[in-house]
Image: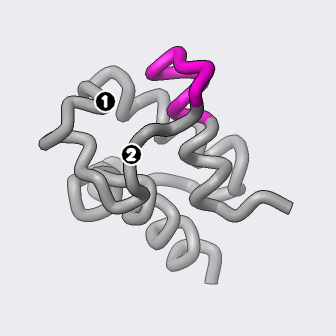
Amino acid sequence: MDSVEQKIAKYISENILFSRNGYGYSVDASFLENGIVDSMNILQLVMFVEENFAVKVGDSDIVPENFDSVAKIANYIRAKSQ
């Protein structure tokens, strides 16, 4: 089974970066610093997280501390799932 990080990276690669070569960044790479996603893409990621990981994302949770890298999203999902 794919890890949470792998699922997130695959989604970003296919649906945001439109890459056939996979996610070409480390899981710790900052989305903002590297221009990987923009504000509209963050909303896509929120919907992806809610639909695929059964996590309800509150408006106050949509901050860089939770959504600025694959690793941060994965940690957020794990914390909300406990």
Residue under the point 60% across and 34% down: 11
* Mark 2, residue position: 25
Residue 52 sits above or below residue 60 on the image = above
Q: Position of residue 65 (x, y in %)?
A: 24, 63
Residue 78 sits above or below residue 32 on the image = below
Q: Are marks 2 and 1 in contact (CB under 8 Å)?
A: no
Q: 65 or 14: which is nearer to us?
A: 14
The N terminus is located in which quarter? bottom right
| SS category of the residue bearing label 1 | loop
In the displayed image of the protein, which residue is found farthest to the top? 18
In the displayed image of the protein, which residue is found farthest to the right? 1
Residue 9 falls in image quadrant: top right
Residue under the point 60% across and 38% down: 48
Total number of numbered discs in the rendering? 2
Mark on residue 78?
none
**How far apart in space, not on screen, are marks 2 and 1 (Cα)?**
12 Å
Q: Is residue 58 magenta?
A: no
Q: Is residue 42 left or right of residue 16?
A: left
The mark that comes first in sequence, 2 or 1, is: 2
Residue 56 sits above or below residue 72 on the image = above
Residue count near mark 2 (Cα–Cα under 10 Å), binned few <14, some 14–19, many ≥20:
some
Q: Position of residue 17 (x, y in %)?
A: 45, 21
The C terminus is located in which quarter? bottom right
Which segment is the magenta one? 11-21
Q: Position of residue 35 (x, y in %)?
A: 20, 30
What amino acid is at disc 2?
A: Tyr
* Mark 1, residue position: 37
Q: 56 or 39: which is nearer to us?
A: 39
Q: Position of residue 29 (x, y in %)?
A: 29, 53
What amino acid is at disc 1?
A: Val
In the displayed image of the protein, which residue is found farthest to the left? 33
